[in-house]
Amino acid sequence: MTDVLAAAKLVVIKVGSSLLVDAETGTLRREWLKSLAADIAALKREGKDVVLVSSGAIALGRRALKLKPGALRLEESQAAAAAGQVRLAGAWAEVLRGEDMTAAQVLLILDDMEHRRRYLNARATLKTLLQLGAVPVINENDTVATSEIQFGDNDQLAARVASMMEADCLVLLSDVDGLYTANPGLDAGAEHLPEVPVITPEIEAMAGGSVSGFGRGGMTSKIIAAKIAVVAGSDVVIAKGKTLNPIAAIRGGGRNTRFFASESPAAARKRWIGGVLHPQGVLIIDDGAVRALKSGSSLLPAGIRQIDGRFERGDAVIIRDQNGMEIARGLTAYGAGDAERIAGKKSLEIEAILGYPGRDEMIHRDDLTLTVDA
Ligand code: GLU
């Protein structure tokens, strides 16, 4: 059995509430948390970046606020999340500090992922945290999320984070050790599937509607999450996390189901950029910039001759040469107004012109896809 994490550079680990919080007492499973922190430290020592997506706020908060057992009203869940999140973040900060790592809390809602400016800001912040050696600990911002803007469960949130960060591997730790051909609780003949090369309708049907007692994610939500992640270029591992050192257990050959990424994260992102249906603007660039783009460079403001359209920072735009031929598509680092002001200018002049230090590139090469042959 190959170690699924061996080649990964960026790993997103999602931890379900049932692993973090003891079902009997409603308290944190601190020894387990410490063991996961040790696993994360081991990944970091191998040079990998790790992003944690942790549930557990509502489960912890309901105890802190002495809420009655059973279903909670929306406002009660949101209140529980507020009381629980501070405890959850505190616990992560403590166990990660025990391994010489710094936890950094990031709370997101679906809107943050769909609103391009906020998406870019979240992505840039997370990248900066990783560069600084921190471990981002992400949860849904349950207190402000209403049903229309909820991820619904952290499986999906983790998949969106994996896609946003171009992670190579998403590990969903929960109370099940993977996908079975049928519900193993109901069907004695259910067989475990160690690998899922492609998520077919049959695979989706196998997930059924199984839901665990804690948290909101069942197998169905894990398959939805896996679909989001694999098309974004991330492998997905579903594994049982209950034992101490759950990541080491997976790496040592413990039972899990692995879903395979359909392509690399960078390729998936480029394909997505190239396929944006409604670019918001057009940048006309000079011949030098055309050559630079074809050789894999970023688009600098200096090479831009003309700007058309009303677009905001982060919007997709088409890049054309001076004959009107489409060369590339990309996500612009500046809105149309600022882009107009710095077009044709050197990157060094950007701060003086705009009054703030912006990016050197109009479109960074990571955000650019050639649509002609180089
Ligand atoms: N965000 C919720 C919490 O922290 C958990 C959602 C889920 O269970 O997936 O309590």
Image: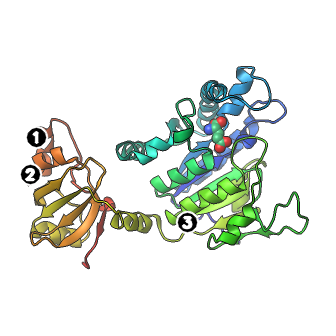
The quadrant of the image that shows the C terminus is bottom left
Residue 229 in the image: state x and y as whole percent.
Answer: 55, 60
Left or right of 339? Residue 133 is: right
Q: Which mark is residue 7?
A: 3
In the depicted structure, whether residue 113 falls above or below residue 266: above
Q: Quadrant of ligand 1?
A: top right
Is the C-beta separation of discs 2 and 1 under 8 Å? yes
Q: Which mark is residue 353?
A: 1
Name the element at disc 1. Answer: helix
Q: Earlier in the sequence, mark 2 or mark 1?
A: 2
Query: Based on the displayed image, in which of its 4 quarters is residue 68 positioned?
Result: top right
- The amino acid type of the residue labelled 1 equals Ile
In the depicted structure, whether residue 49 falls above or below residue 121: below
- Residue under label 2, please give it: 345
How far apart marks 3 and 2 lie (CA) works out to 41 Å
As drawn, which residue projects farthest toward the right?
A: 188
